[in-house]
Amino acid sequence: MTQPRDEWPQLDHTEEQFVRRLAAHYAPQPLTPARRVALNAALWARLQRPPRQTRLTPALATAAVAMLITCLSWSGLFMPPAHDGGPSVSISAPSSTEPWEYELLYSRELTGTTERDDGAILPDDYLGIAQVFLDK
Amino acid sequence: MMEEALVQEPPAVALELEQRFRLFVASHRERARRLAWRLVGGDDAAAEDVVQEAFIKAYRALSQFREEASLATWFYRIVVRQAHNYCRWRTVRETWSALWHGGPQPTAAPASGDPLLRRRIAKALAQLSRSQKEVFVLVHMEGFSVREAAALMEKPEGTVKSHLHRALQALRSELADLAEDTGGKAP
């Protein structure tokens, strides 16, 4: 790196002035002696410590956050949409359904019969109503 | 003795390496800091972090390099990569900061000179591609030769020249007022 400049891009006068101005305006202040001593001390102090895998820490932290966000996003995809006030329909059977209701509703499909007497399976109060309205 | 790599060396060799490293630090600190500062967008603290990290890596690899020139090439390559990594993390931090706090947080520390012009130059450099920016800073600002920059960046010299040309054109277009010829009166 201390070799003589073996090859230098050819710049015209204007370009050279422009580059020189850039370099002059865009440069840090030189280190003060005190700052140099402090930086050297910090460097040797770091070298005295055993090498640690601290450089992986930010990468791991970011990966963990990214995974968390991904998980949250994915779980959001499978969640039901927000309730917008419309009617909701449940396909699950009500837990309070009585056995006679199942028999009344599905017995025809299961047995294939078309006509039968439901009076045998209806409760008494239903039978009373049926007698009034169906003249049974 | 200080580091594991040197603990394994015989004391005389370790002492020689340590002495060699001190000379290396003294020779390259200012240039490395300036290079890092320019690559990270004018941030003093970030530049010092980048350089310290590169020196630590150089120290660990010291015994593998017999020639100072090859060590220096490797060291500056580390500086350039560290600076690039810093810029990537800064972008991530600024993105998160914008998300959580509603706007980007200032990162660069104040320095001497014209801060507005410095910010303009930093912004113009940041608009270049990574390779263009690195090559321009290495060659035109830090005085590395094309061959040195090519070796440092592990790219063909022709590619380096091409990057230099494009970077210069882009910067002259972006900073047209600085590109005007003022009779050679650089500040």
Image (cartoon, rainbow, N blue to C red):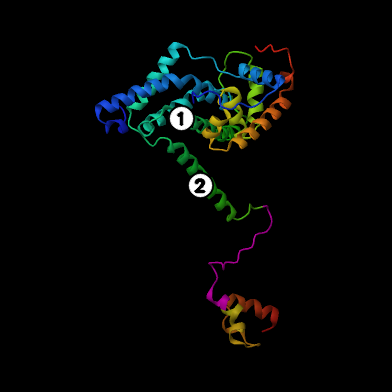
- In the rendered image, residue A93 lying in the magenta stretch gets the answer yes
Quarter of the image containing the C terminus of chain B?
A: top right
The kind of secondary structure the magenta stretch mainly shows is: loop
Give the residue type that dot 2 points to. Answer: Met
Give the residue type that dot 1 points to. Answer: Phe
The chain that hosts pointer 2 is A
x then y, percent, for residue A42: 39, 21
Quarter of the image containing the N terminus of chain B?
A: top left
Residue sitting nearer the eye, B13 or B77: B13
Q: Is residue B12 visible?
A: yes
Do the residues bearing badges 1 and 2 touch, measured as CB atoms within 8 Å? Answer: no
Read off the residue under disc 1.
B75
Position of B29 compared to A49: left or right? right
Residue at x-position 33% and y-position 26%:
B17
Q: Are marks 1 and 2 on the same chain?
A: no
Marks 1/2: CA–CA distance: 35 Å
Residue B143: name its quadrant: top right
Residue sitting nearer the eye, B56 or A61: B56
Read off the residue under disc 2.
A67
Q: Secondary structure at mark 1?
A: helix
The chain that hosts pointer 1 is B
